[in-house]
Image (cartoon, grey):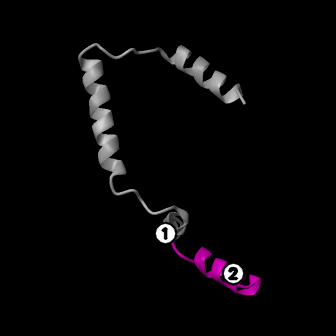
Amino acid sequence: MGTEALSKLRSEALMLSEAERAELAHALVTSLDAPADADAADAWDKEILRRLDEIDAATAKLIDRDEFRRRMRERLDSP
């Protein structure tokens, strides 16, 4: 798509209502993503339930917010 066509499309898109622009933006961003893994949502649901069960059973090792932040900073600072 040439620069002129893109410029025209951008101008027309900016004339849409806020809701229409949001819908268009969502569709465009979604089009850039890889196809969704059909089993991913189910796998995450199972993992979340497993972790909640561990918390309820008091078998999970929990850490406080400060420790979590320390560990994340450490990971981000490591090459």
Rendered location of residue 13, percent (x, y): 59, 77
Q: Which residue is mark 1?
A: 27
Quarter location, residue 70? top right
**Mark 2 neighbour density, 10 Å: few (under 14) some (14–19) many (20 or more):** few
Question: Height in image: 60 above or below 11?
Answer: above
Q: Which labelled disc corresponds to residue 1?
A: none
Kindly report the distance in space between the C-alpha atoms of the residues bearing marks 1 and 2.
17 Å
Taking the image as shown, residue 46 lies to the left or right of residue 34, namely left
Residue at position x 55%, y 65% in the image: 32
Are circles 1 and 2 on residues that touch, CB within 8 Å? Answer: no
Q: Amino acid at mark 1?
A: Ala
Secondary structure beneath disc 2?
helix
**Mark 1 neighbour density, 10 Å: few (under 14) some (14–19) many (20 or more):** few
Rendered location of residue 62, percent (x, y): 40, 15
Rendered location of residue 30, percent (x, y): 49, 64
Q: Amino acid at mark 2?
A: Leu
Secondary structure beneath disc 1?
helix
Rendered location of residue 68, percent (x, y): 53, 20
**Per the image, is 14 magenta?**
yes
Quarter location, residue 73? top right
Residue at position x 54%, y 76% in the image: 16
Start and end of the magenta stretch? 1-20
- How would you classify the magenta stretch by its main secondary structure? helix
Question: Height in image: 11 above or below 79?
Answer: below
Q: Quick one: label 1 or label 2, which is nearer the N terminus?
A: 2
Q: Nearer the viewer, residue 48 or 29?
A: 48
Taking the image as shown, residue 13 lies to the left or right of residue 77, namely left
Q: Quadrant of the C terminus?
A: top right
* Number of numbered discs overlaid on the protein picture: 2
Q: Which residue is mark 2?
A: 6
